[in-house]
Image (tube, grey):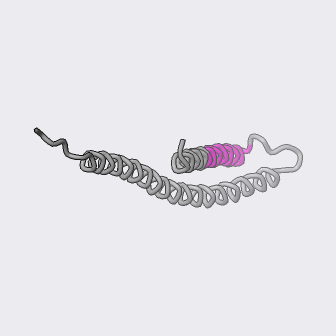
């Protein structure tokens, strides 16, 4: 396996890891949004107030909303990084393809030179 193929595999792996990371961040943000909505609905119905009153629920809801906002920023950054890595992967794939095509061209040139370098047979 050539160095270019190893670099290409490395970049594919990095691209896949970043893709997985962006998806996981998005899923976490969705779960936190659902939790925040559940807390808001509990606060509106007054079902889970407990002895301390609604303040702990409101505090928890605000924390969840801040976390969701932070995660949204992280998801945006992760997607931008993923786009950059995918673009770089395309460049590496193109380089490997060009290199392979260039090697085949070199082999053809070498074969032609070998044919041309043969001494011509003389006929009697």
Q: Where does the image place residue 31, in percent across and percent down from the top left?
A: 65, 43
Q: Where does the image place residue 78, in percent across and percent down from the top left?
A: 59, 56
Overall secondary structure of the magenta stretch? helix
Residue 23, visible in the rendered structure: no
Task: Give yes or no for residue 45 being in the magenta stretch.
Answer: yes
Instruction: Give the residue displayed 43% in from the left and 55% down from the top.
Output: 95
Judge by depth and name the residue closer to the eye, 111 or 24.
111
Which residue is the extreme one toward the front? 124
Judge by depth and name the residue closer to the eye, 124 or 112.
124
- Per the rendered image, the range of residues in magenta is 21-46
Q: Where does the image place residue 124, in percent across and percent down from the top left?
A: 10, 38
Task: Give yes or no for residue 80 being in the magenta stretch.
Answer: no
Instruction: Give the residue displayed 51% in from the left and 60% down from the top.
Output: 84
Classify residue 12 as left or right of residue 122: right
Judge by depth and name the residue closer to the eye, 70 or 41.
70
From this view, report whether residue 14 is shown above or below residue 69: above
Q: Where does the image place residue 46, in percent across and percent down from the top left?
A: 73, 45
Classify residue 117 as left or right of residue 62: left
Residue 3, visible in the rendered structure: yes
Instruction: Give the residue displayed 44% in from the left and 50% down from the top.
Output: 96
């Amino acid at each position: 396996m050539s160095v270019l193929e190893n670099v290409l595999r490395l970049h594919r792996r990095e691209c896949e890891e970043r893709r997985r990371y962006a998806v996981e961040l998005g899923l976490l943000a969705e779960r936190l949004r659902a939790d925040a909505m559940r807390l808001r609905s509990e606060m509106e119905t007054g079902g889970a107030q407990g002895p301390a009153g609604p303040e702990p629920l409101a505090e928890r809801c605000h924390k969840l909303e801040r976390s969701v906002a932070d995660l949204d920023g992280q998801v945006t950054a992760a997607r931008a990084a993923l786009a950059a890595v995918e673009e770089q992967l395309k460049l590496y794939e193109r380089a490997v393809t060009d290199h392979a095509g260039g090697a085949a061209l070199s082999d053809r040139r070498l074969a032609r030179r070998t044919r041309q370098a043969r001494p011509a047979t003389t006929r009697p």
